[in-house]
Image (cartoon, rainbow, N blue to C red):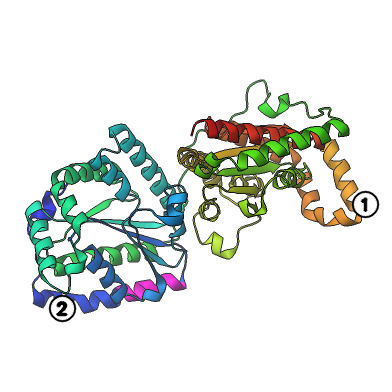
């Protein structure tokens, strides 16, 4: 894959002086057109061999285009807050909004390649990382992102000469460190692993472009020409079409029985017994949150359920047991304009907790397969592919050592009607009932079908759904607290 980049490509000065100004103007025009028609974003990955001109290319792109419309991020080894979050957290936070260009100097490819060369990853772990990357990039493409991946290459001889050249010049000496020379000692291993990864991740939606990094004029025109052509092609055509769903049709069981149908929603628990158990389980939760091992994990608790099922009450019984400095309750409503300018899961990745903290989501990413599905806010292809994207998202969290626990609070239609009326008649509860709640109630059957599909397609071993019989609020709150404590305790025992 790298042989073509070692052929010694060259562009003479006269050709460069003739082509560069025209290309620069055309690239700038396309960038402003993208700003005026923000239907998609552009992500440019800059990866490759040390000394192959990656930094110079990043600088050139910011020089030739309007840097105010470019988000440039350089990624080294994760540190600080980055190291306290799942590995992909920092990349999600760097994604550009529609109408903007993001340049990622170093990316989600760096760590897997490095870990395989150093022996931290065996081939199986590398393959797992590659599979996750392919799914992530497929999701970006499905969301309409224009993803361009450049790998800057030098032969072993060229890299050695380049590092010596940089080291010799006082103006560039700072760019070469012991780490660069240490990597050079393992050039052959890096080449083998990198080529393997590139071949496995060069897809029709996001192919790799290997660039000869030995000659500045050639690599500059190569990168800028491809960027311009890709932008122009997308801008000149209709908005990026939604990818057709590859998910099998959703079919109900022949006998019509679904998992929620087995729930006995009326569960007995007296107020006196509730008071006793509440004290027990809140005390247990507080104790677990103060365990020294808890600093090595974090909790993501998701609350979904029928309107008026008691999500808020259950959340308050959790927060009542915790130090307010250690949790964040995140109410999720319709996405804002800024959030709609990003891939769907972006706003949730940004809210993930650091180690030692709780993030409690009142509604969540499951809105795509519930309200957006039922109300028609998302195309069928989008909510169908969301099941797999959500499972992948949650798997990444649990693989990073987080506790992911999801509660569905279920009540029947009669109990909901009773609670709706009670809210209307109680002054301090009237804010809880809106015309939207009544309208959603009219779609009870459609929502119920969506919930069935959600539970069956996203209840995984890593992040199973806890189905809570919630006609009795006392019973529901205790079940939630108990399940949360048991999940945290299991995680702490594995540390």
Left or right of residue 407: residue 156: left
Q: Nearer the viewer, mark 2 or mark 1?
A: 1
Q: How far across and down, in percent of the image, does residue 157 sit?
A: 6, 54
Q: Mark 1 points at which residue?
A: 425
Q: Which of 36 and 126 is in front in this view?
A: 126
Labelled disc at residue 18 = 2
Q: How far across and down, in percent of the image, does residue 230 sit?
A: 31, 62
Packing grade of label 2 (10 A; few <14, some 14-19, many >=20) is few
- Residue drawn at x 72%, y 26% as measured from the top left: 261
The dominant secondary structure in magenta is helix
- Residue drawn at x 85%, y 47% as measured from the top left: 420
Q: Distance between the residues labelled 2 and 1?
A: 77 Å
Q: Determine whether 120 is above or below 324 in the image.
A: above
Left or right of residue 416: residue 27: left
Look at the numbered discs 2 and 1 and tell me whether their residues touch, using CB distance below 8 Å: no
Q: Read off the magenta span.
A: 27-36
**Disc 2, SS:** helix
- Residue drawn at x 67%, y 53% as measured from the top left: 324
The question of residue 33 being in magenta is answered with yes
Left or right of residue 199: residue 253: right
Q: How far across and down, in percent of the image, does residue 80 sit?
A: 43, 56
Q: Looking at the rendering, which quadrant does residue 196 occupy? A: top left
**Which of disc 1 and disc 2 is earlier in sequence?**
2
- Residue drawn at x 64%, y 35% as measured from the top left: 485
Q: Can residue 471 be seen in this view?
A: no
Q: How far across and down, in percent of the image, does residue 373 sit?
A: 62, 45
Q: Looking at the rendering, which quadrant does residue 285 occupy? A: top right
């Amino acid at each position: 894959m790298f042989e073509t980049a070692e052929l010694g490509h060259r562009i003479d000065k006269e050709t460069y002086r003739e082509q560069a100004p025209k290309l620069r103007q055309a690239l700038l025009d396309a960038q402003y057109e993208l700003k005026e028609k923000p239907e998609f974003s552009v992500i440019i990955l800059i990866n490759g061999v040390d000394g192959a001109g990656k930094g110079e290319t990043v600088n050139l792109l910011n020089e030739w285009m309007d840097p105010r419309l470019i988000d440039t991020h350089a990624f080294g080894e994760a540190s600080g807050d980055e190291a306290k979050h799942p590995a992909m957290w920092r990349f999600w936070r760097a994604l550009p909004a529609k109408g903007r260009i993001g340049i990622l100097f170093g990316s989600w490819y760096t760590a897997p390649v490095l870990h395989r060369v150093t022996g931290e990853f065996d081939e199986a772990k590398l393959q797992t990382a590659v599979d996750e990357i392919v799914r992530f990039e497929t999701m970006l493409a499905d969301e309409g992102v224009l993803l361009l991946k450049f790998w800057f290459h030098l032969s072993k001889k060229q890299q050695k000469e380049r590092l010596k050249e940089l080291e010799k010049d006082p103006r560039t000496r700072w760019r070469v460190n012991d780490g660069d020379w240490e990597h050079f000692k393992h050039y052959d291993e890096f080449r083998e692993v990198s080529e393997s990864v590139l071949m496995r991740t060069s897809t029709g939606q996001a192919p790799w472009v290997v660039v000869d990094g030995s000659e500045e004029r050639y690599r500059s025109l190569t990168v800028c020409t491809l960027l311009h052509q890709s932008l122009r092609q997308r801008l000149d055509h209709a908005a990026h079409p939604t990818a057709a769903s590859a998910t099998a049709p959703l079919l109900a069981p022949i006998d019509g029985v679904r998992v929620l149908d087995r729930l006995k929603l009326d569960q007995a628990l007296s107020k006196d017994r509730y008071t006793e158990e509440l004290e027990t389980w809140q005390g247990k939760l507080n104790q677990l949150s103060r365990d020294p091992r808890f600093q090595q994990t974090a909790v993501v608790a998701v609350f979904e359920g029928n309107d008026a099922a008691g999500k808020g009450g259950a959340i308050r019984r959790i927060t009542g047991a915790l130090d307010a400095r250690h949790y964040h309750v995140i109410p999720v409503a319709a996405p804002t304009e800024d959030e709609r300018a990003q891939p769907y899961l972006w706003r949730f990745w940004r809210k993930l907790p650091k180690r030692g903290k709780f993030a409690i989501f009142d509604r969540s990413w499951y809105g795509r397969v519930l309200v957006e599905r039922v109300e028609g806010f998302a195309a069928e292809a989008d909510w169908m592919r969301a099941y797999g994207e959500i499972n992948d998202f949650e798997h990444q969290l649990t693989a990073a050592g987080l506790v992911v626990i999801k509660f569905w609070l279920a009540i029947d239609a009669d109990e909901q009607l009773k609670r709706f009326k009670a809210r209307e008649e109680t002054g301090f509860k009237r804010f809880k009932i809106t015309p939207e709640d009544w309208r959603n109630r009219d779609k009870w059957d459609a929502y119920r079908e969506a919930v069935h599909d959600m539970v069956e397609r996203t209840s995984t071993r890593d992040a199973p759904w806890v189905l809570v019989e919630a006609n009795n609020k006392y019973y529901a709150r205790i079940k939630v607290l108990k399940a949360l404590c048991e999940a945290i305790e299991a995680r702490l025992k594995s540390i």
